[in-house]
Amino acid sequence: MTPIHSFSTFTRCAALRAAMVLLSVLLPLAAASLPVAKPEDVGLAPERLQRIHEAIMRRVEAGDISGAVTMVARRGRLVHFEAHGLMDLEARKPMTKDALFRLASSTKPVTAAAILILMEEGKLKLTDPVAKYIPEFKNSKVAVEAVRAPAPMSDQGPESGERYYTVPASHDITIVDLLTHTSGLGSGGITGADVQKLLQARTPAETLADFIPRLGALALDFQPGTQWRYSGLAGFDTLGRIVEIVSGTTFDQFLRKRLFEPLGMDNTWFNVPEKEQSRIATIYNRTPSGLQKPAAPLRIGSPVYFSGAGGLTAAAPDYLQFAQMLSNGGQLNGKRILSPWTVDLMLSNNVGDLFAGQIGRPPKGVGFGLGGEVVVSAVDARLRKPNGSYGWDGAYGTYWWVNRKEQMVVVLFVQTPGRSLQYDFDNAVSQAVIE
């Protein structure tokens, strides 16, 4: 017969163990600072949500990725938050929910939000010429391939051996041209060698104020507003400099005060503190020999160069906060960042049909908002997410989207380049929705 005091001790220990298990589940969820809900309370099937983990682990086991962090929120409540696989293969280190990921171009929507904050304050207009703030961008020229030069050569024709000649731009590029990748600035066209030359000459000590004016001398790849071509670095770094000029503070401090602190994004940095660097997930490239670390991971910024195009590193719960703010129409936890009408502008197609078919996107059914892709017709685009979804991805595998009508926010963070996992993830999320 078990003594009463021994039984009591046993039950207390069992209760303590159960409490510890519960805390281990809930504490990481609380870190996202969204209320946690049962999936069925917000129209998702819990057993179907498990297919997210299954989809991710199939890719882990196939050697496509090392690991991932996934999150799903609906109606302002978190229903899925899971770490999968490993964050470092060599060390066999499990992926953690607070792992840090290099955002690369997932930084761009954050930069777009910073511009919109200043627009709402009346400190700039989206139609303002960039030259209003950075005079070096005045009187832009457009590059024309030399082989297309008219005959006989005009006064503006190319000299012998020149790759292109220039003609006047129809208008100086504007802020909205940069936000929508329709400016032609550093867009990977005929001026690409000139852009690379500038980037290679940039020193680690240079700031946005030092470097961005030099971009103003570049010829544009096409007449502004006539095409969509991805400006991987130049366009959004220029927007970061405009934020500095208009706000009177450095770009990193503006984001810290106006976005990160109000939204509780305490794990988002341009330069990760030394004490937090053990949390950074390792980047891996796919190779015929399996996943391998890149010889030299891309370094977009520096301790003083705050790249609005791709310089941020963040934990998945932090980015969920930013995305949830957009889903809520510009506010979170009682903090108003943007007006709902401004968010609608950001999340609407701003480029007509110019984006369809670009950089691996579907040939129809997609548009581009301010800083991110917009699903115009999921049926036409053959995408597994609802119409009106807005989001973007990063070169190292970060991916997310938000849908205001469905009050849905999803995050998939990995650190292996490529988009092959995105459809499987979207499918796993979408099939879990039951109302």
Image (cartoon, helix red, strand yellow):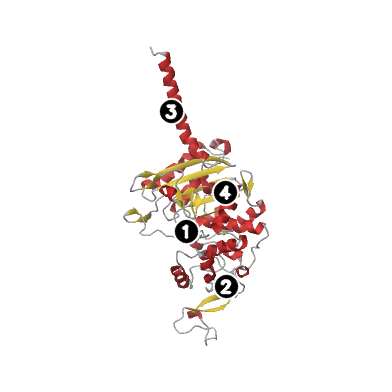
- Looking at the rendered image, the quarter that the C terminus falls into is top right
* Image location (x, y in percent) of residue 225: 59, 68
Using the image as rendered, state which of residue 160 and residue 175 is in the foreground.
175
Residue beneath label 4, please?
A: 261
Label 4 – label 3 distance at C-alpha:
35 Å
Residue beneath label 2, please?
A: 136
Residue beneath label 1, please?
A: 303
**Amino acid type, residue under disc 1 in the picture:** Pro
- Looking at the rendered image, the quarter that the N terminus falls into is top left
Label 1 – label 4 distance at C-alpha:
20 Å
Report if residue 387 is visible in the image: no
- Quarter of the image for residue 8 reads top left
**Amino acid type, residue under disc 4 in the picture:** Glu
Which callout, 1 or 3, points at the residue further toward the start of the chain?
3
**Amino acid type, residue under disc 3 in the picture:** Arg
Circle 3 sits in a helix, a strand or a loop, which is it? helix
* Image location (x, y in percent) of residue 49: 49, 40
Outermost residue toward the top? 1
Checking the image for residue 156, the label placed there is none
Which callout, 2 or 4, points at the residue further toward the start of the chain?
2
